[in-house]
Image: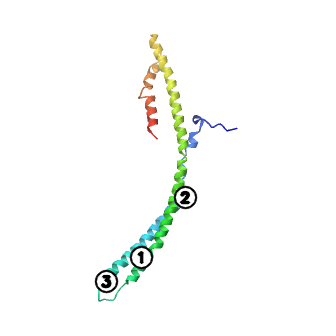
Amino acid sequence: MLARTPKAADMDFASILKIPPMPAAIAEAERKWQAAVADRETAQAKHREMHRLWHNQVPGMPPKITAAEVDQAGAEIAPFLEREKEALQTLEAQRAAFDAEVASLKPKIEAYRSAIAAKIDELEDFISIGAAFYASSVQAKVKLPSRMPSRCESLLSVHGVGMLRRLLNAVD
């Protein structure tokens, strides 16, 4: 026999609607990626400096650096680029896993939205009793001992319950 799913109004939203904790693996992956970026930038800065030195050599003077040394420094950048790419992929995978966990909240939020809509419907029905009671008192020409029923009609207007419904429907 299939288990009956609870109605949205019966759910304990205070315990269901919780933001999952950010995994420490994301922070660690972020640190590794930033370290890989820093290492690559250091290698690139070394290559640029060597290239500048090679171009600034004065003809007729002994060379301070050779083109082969500059090329070697340029070739040494490739492993740093690869490490940065791997670190970024790891970071993106960690973030995607967390984003998927956050996305799993969508059905819970939809259930919460349905519960709010149901409560608004209940409130509207409940307030309409007061509005009908006030209308019948006016028709019977009876002055009620409280002004509260006379306010129920305005609560049903677009600025009362109608506003609540529009606010709820205005969000995704």
**Marked residue nearer the N-terminal end (1 or 2):** 2
CA gap, disc 2 and disc 3? 50 Å
Tell me whether the residue at label 1 lies in contact with that at label 2, contact meaning CB atoms closer than 8 angstroms.
Answer: no
Image height check: is 169 above or below 77?
above
Residue that badge 2 annotates: 24
Question: In the image, residue 52 lies at what x, y percent?
Answer: 34, 78
Residue that badge 3 annotates: 57
**Marked residue nearer the N-terminal end (3 or 1):** 3
Q: Which is more toward the observer, 62 or 123? A: 62
Under tag 3, what secondary structure? loop
Q: Quadrant of residue 66?
A: bottom left
- Image-based side of 51 in relation to 156, left or right: left
CA gap, disc 1 and disc 2? 35 Å
Residue that badge 1 annotates: 74
Q: Residue 32, can we see it?
A: no
Q: Quadrant of residue 157?
A: top left
Indicate which label's residue lies in the foreground, 1 or 2: 1
Q: Quadrant of residue 3?
A: top right
Q: Which is more toward the observer, 90 or 141? A: 90
Image height check: is 48 above or below 160?
below
Q: Amino acid at mark 2?
A: Ala
Residue sitting at 42 percent across and 72 percent down? 42
Under tag 1, what secondary structure? helix
Indicate which label's residue lies in the foreground, 2 or 3: 3
